[in-house]
Amino acid sequence: MADALNYSGFNLSNKSVSTPENMTLTYHRIIEAFRFANAQKAKLADPLHEKNVTEFVKYMTSDSFADNIRNKIKDDIKQTSYDEQGIKIVPDDHGTSHLSVIAKDGSAVAVTSSINNFFGSGVMSCLRGIIFNDQMSDYTSPEMKNGPNAIKPGKRPLSSMCPTIILDKDSRKVRMVAGGAGGTNITTSVAQVILDHLYFDYNLQKAVAEPRVQVPPNVTNVEEGFDSLRRHGKCAELVLFQERG
């Protein structure tokens, strides 16, 4: 998510969505930024088991990387390729919940928990009544044995969960706490709520309620409210969807 926000910042402000024309251009750029960010997921994994991941994360959140990707985003076309290695999509989850809290003293908590799919593994502890998760499905598929997210003993699988606390860069006080559920839609959904609130100046209720875009492979899914973007056919193929992240 930090990667997506790093280079979706084309001097964004409330003016970026003030007219249908501005909104169309802004969301085209956001969609392209999300696609480039999603392409990097194929290179991520548990940094305790994959030695190059920590350095890659530093690189992909750097200004130089953001500048490089931003220069690839064209205002009048959709890219034909976002990453040579492609990306393996982790199945969507249906057993995730999130809680965001800001206390009176300014301290904050963002907690996301998940058992992955409906009822997790389908197995419940007879002693405690706890439903066990099925997070093993979040590893790369078995036929891709050498990928960064391949199964190893003691290794944590890649997850789309992104409990987020945003601090003011000067005062270090909490500006925003965010997170969500929805599998692969989580990161882009949280990023859009952050953009809506901190860049477009929407209040939190409006930021959460605003229509969203999602970027699964080969298609761009949009909720009702993006008529101008749907007419902008050069940007992407668009499909209406109902499930939210």
Image (spheres, grey):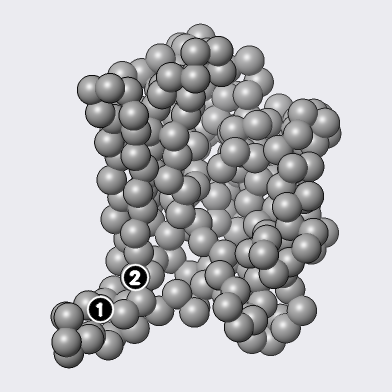
Q: Is residue 238 visible?
A: no
Residue 185, image x, y percentages: 45, 52
Residue at image point 34% right, 39% down: 109
Residue at image point 65% right, 20% down: 10
The quarter of the picture where the N terminus appears is top right
Residue furthest to the front: 105
Which residue is denoted by mark 1 in the rendering? 131
Query: What's the distance in space between the residues labelled 1 and 2, CA to CA?
Result: 8 Å
- Mark 1 touching mark 2, by CB under 8 A? yes
Kindly state the secondary structure of the residue where label 2 is placed: loop
**Residue type pointed to by label 1:** Ile
Q: Residues within 10 Å of mark 2 (few under 14, many from 20)?
A: some
**Residue type pointed to by label 2:** Ile
Residue 227, image x, y percentages: 43, 32
Residue 199, above or below 145: above
Q: Residues within 10 Å of mark 1 (few under 14, many from 20)?
A: some
